[in-house]
Amino acid sequence: MPAENETQKVEAVLREHAMSYPGAHEDFPWGHRAMKVNDKTFLFMTVDGEKLNLSAKLPDSKDAALTLPFTEPTEYGLGKSGWVTAHFEDASQVPVPVIKAWIDESYRAIAPKKLVDQLPARGTAVPGPASKPAKAAAGRKASASKAAAPVKKAAKKVVSKVKAVAKKAAARVKTAAKKATKKVAKTASAAKAKTARKPAAPARGKRAATSAPKRARRS
C-alpha cells in the first residue's frame, strides 16, 4: 500500500475531528467522503493527488468565509443555503484550525438539537468530556483566537490589495487631471496671444480712418 501524502494526512486529521461529534458517521456517495449525522451530510471531502476539496454549511460565517481566496459558494444551489466550498492545491494551504471551526459550525447547523446540546459551548474544541469550567473556557477562547488568525491574515491581505489598487487609480487620475489642466492653460494662452496680434475691427457704421490726399501745389 502506497504511503499517505501530506494532503491525505490532513484529510485524516479533519475526518477524525468530524467523527468525534455525537452520532457522526461516514458515507461515500458518488465516491466522495461524506461525514453525516442522522443521515444528513455536514461535511464533504475529496482528495485528488495533492489537492483537497471540501464543503461545509456555514449559516453564520458564510460571508466572511467567501472573502478568502480559496473559497466559493457550493454548486448545485447549495450555496444559497449557506454551503461554502474550499479548494486547496496542497496540504500547506489548508488552515486546519479554521476548517475545524467550519466543521463545528456545519455539524451544529445539521445535527438534531438533542445532539447539539451534548456539545460544549460554541468554539473549535473537539467534543468530549468537559474539563473544569474556567479551564475549558480559557481553552475555547484560545482556540477561537487561533482559528480566527488565518482568517484575519487573509482579510488583511485583501484589504491591502484593495488599498494598493485604489492608490494606483488615484495617482493615474491625478496625473491625467494635471495633464488636462496644463493643456487647457496652454490653449488659453495661445488664444490670448492670437487675439492680441489681431487688429481691432472698426466700429459698426463707421469707416476706418484714412489719411487725406495731399493737394498739389500750384506752380
Image (cartoon, helix red, strand yellow):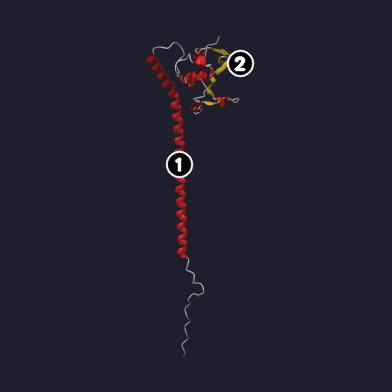
Name the front one of labels 2 and 1. Answer: 2
Q: Pinpoint residue 48: horizontal percent, then vertical percent.
A: 56, 18
Q: Secondary structure at mark 2?
A: helix
Label 2, label 1: how many angstroms apart (C-alpha)? 52 Å
| Crowding at mark 1 (Cα within 10 Å: few <14, some 14-19, many 20+) | few
> Which of 104 and 176 lies nearest the eye of the viewer?
104
Q: Residue furthest right?
A: 30
Q: Residue furthest left?
A: 134
What amino acid is found at the position of numbered circle 2 in the picture?
A: Pro
Q: Pinpoint residue 204: horizontal percent, then vertical percent.
A: 51, 72
Quadrant the N terminus occupies: top right
What amino acid is found at the position of numbered circle 1 in the picture?
A: Ala
Q: At 48% from the left edge and 22% from the top edge, which residue is drawn? A: 93
Q: Pinpoint residue 67: horizontal percent, then vertical percent.
A: 49, 29
Q: At 46% from the left edge and 34% from the top edge, which residue is drawn? A: 162
Which residue is labeled 1 in the image?
Answer: 170
In the rendered picture of this protein, how many numbered marks are placed on residues? 2
Residue 48 visible within the image: no
175 versus 94 height, above or below: below
Q: Residue furthest bottom?
A: 219
Marks 1 and 2: in contact by CB < 8 Å? no
Q: Residue furthest top?
A: 1
Q: Secondary structure at mark 1?
A: helix
| Mark 2 vs 1, N-terminal side | 2
Give the quarter of the image for residue 146: top left
> Which of 24 and 55 lies nearest the eye of the viewer?
24
Residue 122, which numbered label?
Answer: none
Which residue is labeled 2 in the image?
Answer: 29
Q: Pinpoint residue 174: horizontal percent, then vertical percent.
A: 44, 45
| Crowding at mark 2 (Cα within 10 Å: few <14, some 14-19, many 20+) | few
Residue 140 visible within the image: yes
